[in-house]
Amino acid sequence: MAEPQLLEMRGIVKRFPGVLANDGVDFDVRAGEVHTLLGENGAGKSTLMKILYGLYAADEGEVRLEGASVEIASPTDAIAHGIGMIHQHFMLVDTLTVAENVALGLESSRGILTDLDRVSERIADLSVRYGLHIDPEAVIWQLAVGQRQRVEIIKALYRDARLLILDEPTAVLTPQEVDQLFVTLRQMTSDGRGLIFISHKLHEVLALSDRITVLRHGRVTGNVAVEDATRQGLAEMMVGRQVQMVPDKPTVVTTEPVLKIEKLTVMGDRGDEAVRGLDLEVRAGEILGIAGVSGNGQRELAQSIAGLRGVESGTVQIDGADVTNLRPAEVRAQGLAYVPEERMHTGAIAGFSVTENLLLIDHGDKRFVSRGLLDFGAIRKHCQGLVDEYDVKTPGLDTPSQTLSGGNIQKMILARELSGTPKVLIAAQPTRGVDIGASEYIHRRLIEQRSESTGVLMVSEDLDEVFALSDRIAVIYEGQIIGIVDAATATREAVGLMMAGVEPEAIGE
């Protein structure tokens, strides 16, 4: 007998100026199941969930909980109806304890007096029941990322949520932490709770889900049971065409190192050593993937190579030339191309047009100057060529870059950075927040650079991406390279353990 319906959303329509975000969407969740909501960026997933959680009001349609029609006008209404939401970016106060965070917003059973002892008791009970292992007295800033996520789950369980929305919950977890999370989520469904899982990682979707609903351009394009689903089929429903899931990687003979880093130490924003005595080499014609949990020095490493962050000690060499602490323009002149992780902060200027962003680093090039003045004809010809070659979808060259999708902004940055002949390419989180179609294109471009004997240093927190593209994988932990493995023979389990700080020699003992 089928489990009863916890949630029914029928004919949901949501319009924004010039955009139909949800176009008659039907979606339901049964008690005791994980129902995944899948789709590219802009497909309408977040809009639908914001309607369910009371952040948006639907223009048309109905929401029913356990058979009764309900109006959800705010998150407070949603929580009162037993709906919880685990956000991708945690909603915790760093300076408070676990118990204090859980108690925030709740009435005390003792009137004006706090009842944190009772809150702590209940947290301890929930921790044991669901295998969450959290100390109620721990201060949030002292907890690791995976532990903070457990606190978010405890907050929802404490409020007795029957229906839980999980928005990209694995984005910052190691593979082992993902496995632990999935055990907890399965325990929750066995208690009759319904879970809505939002993720772009297809192997996780297939591992956890009972059913999968796919959205494209605001409409449902598929609803399948997990036993009938494949990665290829889901990708095609998301994009509307055949997608190459694993990029072809032709054999390339690597040569001498083009990027050499020795004993590098770099300070973080909080005055701590974010990179500590790090040694690394990238060879011409290889992709070296940097794997690691967010916050282990990846950002500081990439910025220090590019000249955007000072080096305390150690050296950085590009093709034999010492570029340590040179200005970004000087590092670039030695053959560096840099695709930063923060597209709209470091990679592009939001209010600038596509043309202006494409010309940011080449505006003084003699190709674009005639008699001391900018040659706008030559500039437009050059930029249009890049837009066409890199398939940047834009209404025109004068369009502000901030109006483009994340994938097209990333392709615009790639076009600019690769328009020369770089010896070294740093690609930091190259497909973060980018939909599957744009990811496929970006992966192909990175492999093309490898084939042209560029040394590619790719920093990514997506292990699927790291394994698919890398020739070698270097694992970073607390600012140091803990191990380097051959991508063709390495296992996800071994890399995941190193990401958690386990020395390579200790794996398998």
Image (cartoon, grey):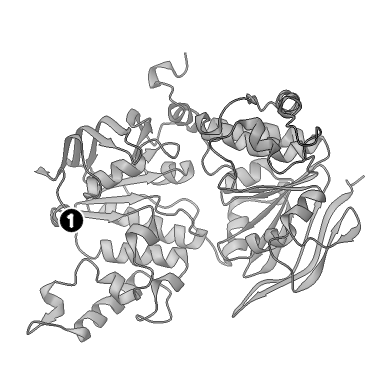
Q: Residue at x 33, y 72 (%)?
A: 389
Percent from the top left, x then y, of residue 342? 39, 55
Q: Residues within 10 Å of mark 1 (few under 14, many from 20)?
A: many
In the image, taking residue 297 as reference, residue 219 lies left or right, namely right
Percent from the top left, x then y, of residue 265? 24, 33
- The residue sitting at the top extreme is 509
SS for dot 1: helix
Between residue 283 and residue 27, name the one nearer to us.
27
**In the rendered image, the vertical position of residue 389 relative to residue 481, given as above or below:** below
**In the rendered image, the vertical position of residue 393 relative to residue 66, given as above or below:** below
Q: Specify the amino acid type for callout 1.
A: Arg
Between residue 28 and residue 437, name the one nearer to us.
28
Residue 214 position by quadrant:
bottom right
Residue 271 position by quadrant:
top left
The residue beneath circle 1 is 332
Q: Residue at x 47, y 44 (%)?
A: 462
